Image (cartoon, rainbow, N blue to C red):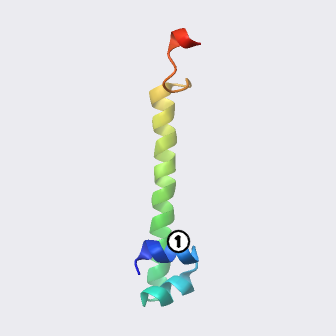
Amino acid sequence: MTFLEAYAKFGPDTLAIAEALHIKENEADRLINARLNCSYAERLHARRVKKIAYAGKEPFVSEWAR
């Protein structure tokens, strides 16, 4: 079982993931934190890109179509 499979099955439960992957609880906690930080960074980046690229306008809507 991979970490992502265990995370999908058990969620952020460090004990369950540690038992499923046969690792220490602190290592499971580190992996969960890395996953949550990565997803937060991806969401933050997507919001920044959307604000910069579209400058408040909706994407793929031309000016004459409004």
Screen quadrant of the N terminus: bottom left
Which residue corresponds to mark 1?
Answer: 8
Residue in the picture at 45% in, 59% down: 38
Secondary element type, mark 1:
helix
Count the marks: 1
- In front here: 35 or 64? 64
- Looking at the picture, does residue 50 appear above or below residue 35? above
Residue 55 point in image, percent of width and height: 51, 25
Residue 53 point in image, percent of width and height: 45, 29
Residue 42 point in image, percent of width and height: 46, 51
Q: Within the image, what quadrant is residue 49 found in?
A: top left
Farthest residue to the front: give it: 65
Residue in the picture at 44% in, 71% down: 4
Q: Within the image, what quadrant is residue 31 found in?
A: bottom left
Residue in the picture at 48% in, 61% down: 37
- In front here: 2 or 24? 2
- In front here: 62 or 46? 62
